[in-house]
Image: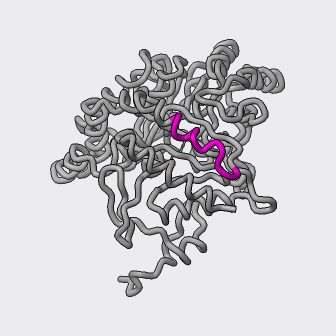
Amino acid sequence: MSNRPNDLSSYWMPYTANRAFKQDPRMIAAADGMFYKSADGRDILDGTAGLWCVNAGHNARRITEAVQKQVAELDYAPSFQFGHPKAFEFANRVADLFPDGMDHVFFTNSGSEAVDSALKIALHYHRMRGDAARTRLIGRERGYHGSGFGGISVGGIVKNRMYYGSLLTGVDHLPHTHDLTLNAFSRGCPEHGAEKADGLIDIATLHDPSTIAAVIVEPMAGSTGVLLPPKGYLKRLRELCDRYGILLIFDEVITAFGRLGANSAADYFGVKPDIITTAKGITNGVVPAGAVIVSNEIYQSAMDNADAPIELFHGFTYSGHPLAAAAGLASLDTYAQDDLFERAAALAPYWEEAIHSLKDAPNVIDIRNLGLVGAIELEPRAGAAAARGTEAMIKAWERGVMIRVTGDIIALSPPLIIEKSQIDQIFGTLSSVLDSIA
Ligand SMILES: Cc1ncc(COP(=O)(O)O)c(C=O)c1O
């Protein structure tokens, strides 16, 4: 047993400036509703739903109780060659929330695993159909698809890729869609940039379309700093994938389960992909879980063309874990019974007005929003990229609001239970924070 309980050195924190954090830790002790409680006893308003996951707010009673009950009833059941009823019920309930004809769900434990699973399922699908030359995977610049080798290969965030060797081979990237010259201070989806989807024509011409298995994009890119799809962009991408026989994967790890005021981004934008990856809100962040939702065509093809009794040689010890299933079912109940997706849609116009009220704050070069998502992009300090963003995050924490920053972009995505007065608190605090940063 360690005799150094207050020593912070053992825990190597993910995507964190460990040295800086351990000098001046931001420690969270408890959470309820819209608020965290810091270790020094302060209430911190959650402007980010944790990490885009706590859509129903913290300590949501039905979810907490369902998990407590489940752990005492069935703590674990093997997921290979055995099942338990809640995993099947959960899959049915998840499938009900996604577009018609996407009725099959493969469970994972995280978004990263969902992404790597989806990429494998796409390759498997083509191979099983006898189209084995389709092996290329296409992502997008500035995309974030988690931290697995598949995800960082199709992802487009340089620091997440550059240290890790040659990654997956046979990957190419679409151009990103972020264009502040044309689209700064857009409200909702920007007007300009649908033609960026035509990058797929160039890629298909270069490699020949018959070698491309799948395109993966976030319908709304979150982790790279909230990049919204230009109007018409996703529809155009769907048309091009159809033209070339390429599967379209939407990575909905943050957009599914109400973030945009709809079941999913596919639903919100009216564009149906072949595969959807998700996680986070699927269990309200209470138990780690993720999922891949596939079209009936993909599932049926695996069942019909299998060359072995096991149709897909892929899975996880904790796929469909009983606690995840219980938390997930209770989360979906909570979302439905409390009309949280409708609530997000109804609050979106108020949110939009509130965030755009910071237009004239110092160093702000863009503000953008969609559903209950918002971003405030700050001019980077000369020679010190990310310094302003980091300072804003620390000052907001000190003043009682949790925000998230990617470089110099502040990203906001509160729990869907937020009240208007709490929206005012977020932007009132941010206004004073930005005024205090040189
Ligand atoms: C679009 C997207 N994909 C994948 C992931 C990875 O999810 P996880 O951290 O659960 O592995 C994230 C996480 O933020 C994400 O936003």
Q: Residue at x 78, y 26 (%)?
A: 203
Q: Residue at x 73, y 25 (%)?
A: 193
Q: Is residue 33 above or below residue 56?
A: below
Q: Residue 356 in magenta?
A: yes
Compared across the picture, whether 6 is left or right of 386 comes to left
Q: Residue at x 66, y 45 (%)?
A: 360
Q: Residue at x 50, y 27 (%)?
A: 265
Is any atom of residue 45 visible in this view? yes
Boundaries of the magenta span: 352-363
Q: Position of residue 264 (x, y in %)?
A: 46, 28
Compared across the picture, whether 31 is left or right of 249 comes to left
Quarter holding the C terminus is bottom right
Q: Position of residue 326 (x, y in %)?
A: 26, 42
Q: Position of residue 304 (x, y in %)?
A: 46, 18
Q: Nearer the viewer, residue 195 or 182?
A: 182
Task: Give the image quarter of residue 347.
Answer: top left
